[in-house]
Amino acid sequence: MSLNNRTFVIANPRAGAGAVEREWDLLERLLRTRLPEFDFAFTEGPEHATFLAREALRSGWQMVVAVGGDGTLNEVVNGLYEKPNCAENYRIDHDGWMTRTHDAAPVAINPDAVIGYLPLGTGGDFRRSIGLMGGHSESAEHLCGQHTRNVDLGEVGYVDESGRIASRYFINIASVGFSGAVDRVVNRTWKGFGGRTSYMLATIRAFLRYKNIDVEVRLDETQEISGKMNNIVIANGEFFGGGMWIAPGAELDDGQFQVVFMGDLSRREITALVFDIYQGTHLQHKKIFRHRASRISVRSADGGVSILDIDGEAPGGLPALWTNHHNALTLKA
């Protein structure tokens, strides 16, 4: 089977402040000249990309390509698998930790399916981790080669906004704390200034009212960490927040997350760290440290509200449990 055959493209017309819709004629021509058998659909709202990906795979398409930002990619990634049974897989125990009651691996709709990515969104962070930083032509060109790579798939169980246990897969980064608050602002405002500027403006707005969270953390059930944190970043990729190099050295295929703890930082300290985070030199700060783990559990120590960030979306909060599924995803590279 050629990996060039039967490609279904899922495009978010609103991604990049409408850039996908404006530039679709060019994108479609580029794709049609490179992909022998190709069809597409536009998303119409939240989670539609997940539905479209599942239907495409069940209909026999062999590669599914996400066109848009990191949020669109996340939805397509979730559509490669059957929806997890949260009631069967997770529970909150008597002392407030999220635990797994059924340690199930992701159930792929088509185990031979490949996911591709044509980035055109606000943040565009995952493309930095895979080195896809060229223009549309380069992004389309990489879809027609034969090379693929297996990468780790993250899964997080959490409490959604209605108070129910939910779960979601992710490919890049899922964190809790300040980044979730920034997501809430970004996703509720206009993004026409572009990725970095939009995130910087959202960061400033969230910064003015954010308070550090008091949490308890378990790493692989062998180590516990507690205290006030500005942010806890569970990283498969290296970048988030519109180009912030938050987890230098994080690897997509090593079976572990890089966990970056940004401690009880003051507003003055955070302000001084902004440039360092974009340069990846923030890890030298005395209140920032990191570990590696394949399973991370976090609960609130004081009952405060803590917002998750999952590949740029903010669907809920603590308690939460992150699990690394080693090399569970095949990526066109």
Image (cartoon, grey):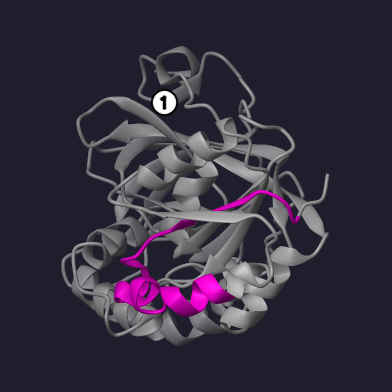
1 on left or right of 124: right
Residue 233 visible? The answer is no
Residue 22 visible? The answer is yes
Image x and y of residue 4, in percent: 75, 56
The one of 270 and 280 positioned closer to us in this rendering: 280
- Residue appearing at x 46%, y 12% in the figure: 88
State whether residue 295 is above or below residue 37: above
Residues in magenta?
Answer: 4-29
Instruction: Look at label 1 and name its amino acid.
Output: Trp
Image x and y of residue 91, in percent: 41, 17
Residue 14 magenta-drawn? Answer: yes
The one of 19 and 292 positioned closer to us in this rendering: 19
Check the picture and name the quadrant holding the C terminus. Answer: bottom right
Check the picture and name the quadrant holding the N terminus. Answer: top right
Q: Secondary structure at mark 1?
A: loop
Image x and y of residue 23, in percent: 41, 79
Residue beneath label 1, please?
Answer: 97
